């Protein structure tokens, strides 16, 4: 956990050094404070990683267990006041993390997964079927509400814009047209 805290501090310092200085303005005339904004942001992020989400609990965690790493930890009121002034900093850090994740992950809707039964026999014949016994078995298809003898076909396909549009059109709400009006339209 000690390494995690140190790595987090180094990361925060890296972000402060490489990002725009307009997001990290000192709001006081103290250019070199004993307790830096980098330390403050590190404490906040470390608290989040430890499952501590309240500012008071974060301050107590650091004061009780990690004081050696932050000897100049201010009083709770000063801690909260300075933390509240750092909102632009958290926007910049969030955009940094978002960029890191964007570079390392594919989009969420990148692949489509589906499965369907290949029915060799269904209904009452499913249990007495003798076709492909070495690979096929009896299963239940919930969408068709029927038992079958066969195999399941699982597919994973890369989503193309056309496939996503077709799926969205399929899921779009449809307008209900009564059968009587459909018959009248076809007769005339």
Image (tube, rainbow, N blue to C red):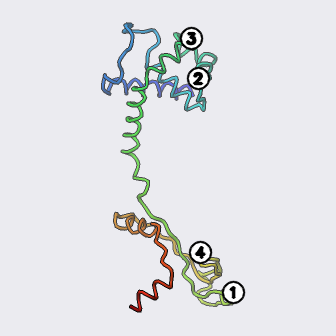
Residue 108 in the figure: left or right of residue 131:
left
Give the Cα distance between marks 2 and 1: 62 Å
Give the Cα distance between marks 1 and 3: 75 Å
Q: Position of residue 18 (x, y in %)?
A: 32, 27
Query: Mark 2 — residue?
Result: 58
- Quadrant in which the N terminus is drawn: top right
Answer with mark 4 or mark 2, whichever residue precedes in sequence: 2
Residue 127 - label:
1
> Does residue 140 lie above or below 186 as drawn?
above
> Does residue 87 lie above or below 188 as drawn?
above
Q: How packed is label 4: few (under 14 Cα within 10 Å), some, or many (20 or more)?
A: few
Q: How packed is label 1: few (under 14 Cα within 10 Å), some, or many (20 or more)?
A: some
| Disc 4, SS | loop
| Disc 1, SS | loop
Give the Cα distance between marks 1 and 4: 20 Å
Answer with mark 2 or mark 3, whichever residue precedes in sequence: 2
Give the Cα distance between marks 2 and 3: 12 Å
Answer with mark 1 or mark 4, whichever residue precedes in sequence: 1
Query: Mark 3 — residue?
Result: 75
Which quadrant would residue 22 be assigned to in this image? Answer: top left
Q: Position of residue 106 (x, y in %)?
A: 40, 52
Query: Mark 4 — residue?
Result: 143
Q: Position of residue 77 (x, y in %)?
A: 55, 13
| Disc 3, SS | loop
Give the Cα distance between marks 4 and 2: 50 Å
Give the Cα distance between marks 4 and 3: 62 Å
Do callouts 2 and 3 mark residues in contact (Cβ within 8 Å)? no
Tell me what residue is drawn at x 45 percent, y 9 percent. Answer: 34
Which of label 4 and label 2 is nearer to you? 4
Q: Position of residue 184 (x, y in %)?
A: 44, 88
Do callouts 4 and 2 mark residues in contact (Cβ within 8 Å)? no
């Amino acid at each position: 956990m000690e390494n995690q805290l140190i790595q987090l501090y180094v990361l925060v310092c890296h972000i402060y050094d490489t990002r725009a200085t307009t997001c990290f303005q000192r709001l006081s005339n103290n250019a070199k404070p004993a307790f830096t904004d980098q330390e403050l942001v590190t404490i906040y992020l470390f608290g989040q990683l430890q499952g501590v989400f309240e500012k008071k609990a974060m301050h107590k965690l650091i004061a009780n267990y990690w004081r050696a790493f932050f000897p100049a930890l201010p009083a709770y009121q000063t801690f909260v006041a300075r933390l509240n002034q750092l909102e632009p900093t958290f926007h910049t850090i969030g955009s940094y993390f978002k960029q890191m994740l964007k570079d390392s992950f594919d989009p969420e809707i990148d692949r489509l997964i589906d499965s369907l039964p290949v029915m060799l026999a269904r209904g009452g014949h499913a249990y007495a079927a003798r076709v492909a016994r070495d690979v096929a078995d009896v299963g239940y298809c919930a969408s068709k509400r029927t038992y079958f003898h066969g195999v399941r076909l699982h597919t994973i396909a890369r989503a193309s814009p056309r496939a996503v549009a077709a799926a969205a059109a399929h899921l779009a709400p449809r307008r209900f047209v009564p059968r009587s009006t459909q018959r009248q339209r076809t007769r005339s």
